Amino acid sequence: MALPKFERRPVVRASVKITNAGDGLSEAMRLAPEALQLGDEVWFVIKGEVVRVAHESAPKDDHNLVRVHTVKASDVALVAKDAVQDVLHAEQDRIARLREEEEGIQRLTEDPLGILDEGDPDA
């Protein structure tokens, strides 16, 4: 999806800033303390509202713009890895495919000749 122009200038990228993300979680940890250790992997779910949209000059490019969305978090929860793992993997795959498309790489989506069998060769 193409980004809309802003004041007749092309918008070439979008980014997001999240504010207040720690507020609700800090309150929850005050009421039910939990010690996170250095190196721990943690997963969060954030609910928020877009409260500001701004346009900034793209880095090293005075003509093109970056659309910057500010999201104010209203709810934040520390969640188990199993609750979000599939969603994160799907998003990582989607981003990898978009990067490949951007680079002109096309993946085979079908195997009409049956040559891409990924099954166990010893089965």
Image: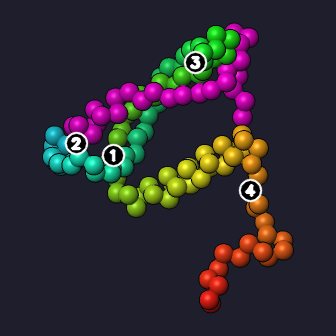
Kindly identify the residue that appears in the image at 16 percent across and 40 percent down: 30
The boundaries of the magenta stretch are 1-28
**Mark 2 or 3, which is nearer the eye?**
3
Q: Residue furthest bottom?
A: 123
Q: Earlier along the polypeptide chain: callout 1 or callout 3?
A: 3
Residue 108 x, y percent position in the rendering: 77, 60
Q: CA distance from mark 2 to mark 3?
A: 38 Å
Return the residue nearer the eye: 101 or 94: 101
Q: Disc 1 marks which amino acid?
A: Ala
Q: Is residue 70 above or below residue 75?
A: above
Kindly identify the residue that appears in the image at 17 percent across and 48 percent down: 35
Q: Which residue, given by chain and number where applicable, does mark 3 sit on?
A: 59
At mark 2, the secondary structure is helix
Q: Are marks 1 and 3 in contact (CB under 8 Å)?
A: no
Return the residue nearer the eye: 115 or 70: 115
Q: Earlier along the polypeptide chain: callout 3 or callout 4?
A: 3
Q: Which residue, given by chain and number where applicable, does mark 4 sit on?
A: 107
| Residue 6 seen by the camera | no
Q: CA distance from mark 1 to mark 4?
A: 36 Å
At mark 3, the secondary structure is loop
Q: Disc 4 marks which amino acid?
A: Arg
**Mark 1 or 3, which is nearer the eye?**
3
Q: Which residue, given by chain and number where applicable, does mark 2 sit on?
A: 28
Residue 70 x, y percent position in the rendering: 47, 24
Q: CA distance from mark 2 to mark 4?
A: 44 Å
At mark 4, the secondary structure is loop
The quarter in which the N terminus is drawn is top right
